[in-house]
Amino acid sequence: MMNNKNGISAIVATVLIILITVAAVTIVWIAVIPLVSDSVNEGTECITADRSMVLENKGYTCRNDSDNTINVHVSLGSEDVVLAGVQVLVSTGGSTSSETINDISLLPKINEAKVLTTGVDAAYADATGVSVAPIMVVGGVAKVCTVSREIALVPCL
């Protein structure tokens, strides 16, 4: 008696395995590349902003006790950075409060320095330090970048 069972030839099986592998790689490529690309863009934008924006520790960064505001002297270097905002973090005792400045006309431009005023809160009268973080728009989404080093606040003259 003869067995009449036909199977897939080795060539057809090999071609199918190659096609399945190519399809899997394509699907992973389509899913992973945009994810990695967005992360890289976000990282480079924030690194550039962090390197360019400086919280100045000159006479203009101070606490104004008469009206409970904080003056923050921020400068932007020569890097091609367009800020969407600046987050100002004020330390009082053991806690930190933040305020976001989104008015682009108030923010420094390339090779410019500005004094930003934040607050009007009675708690700011006891503020001990201030730091800032640039806010960038990356992929259509606002991203708060790394916070600068904290500077001790002194009363304004």
Image: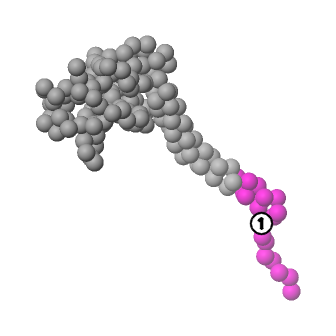
Q: Where is residue 93 in the image (x, y as percent from the top left)?
A: 25, 45
- Quadrant assignment, res 29: top right
Residue 40 among those drawn in magenta: no
- Quadrant assignment, res 148: top left
Is 151 left, or right, of 67 in this rendering?
A: right
Question: Which range is magenta?
Answer: 1-19
* x 45%, y 27%: residue: 49
- The residue labelled by disc 1 is 8
Work out whether residue 92 or residue 135 is closer to the camera in this orientation and state it.
92
Work out whether residue 116 or residue 21 is closer to the camera in this orientation and state it.
116
Is residue 34 shown to the viewer in this render?
Answer: no
Figure check: 55 above or below 16: above
Is residue 44 shown to the viewer in this render?
Answer: yes
* x 27%, y 29%: residue: 154
Figure check: 22 above or below 139: below
Binning the other alpha carbons within 10 Å of mark 1 as few (below 14), some (14 to 19) or many (20 upward) gives few
* x 27%, y 26%: residue: 62
Q: Position of residue 128 (x, y in %)?
A: 27, 37
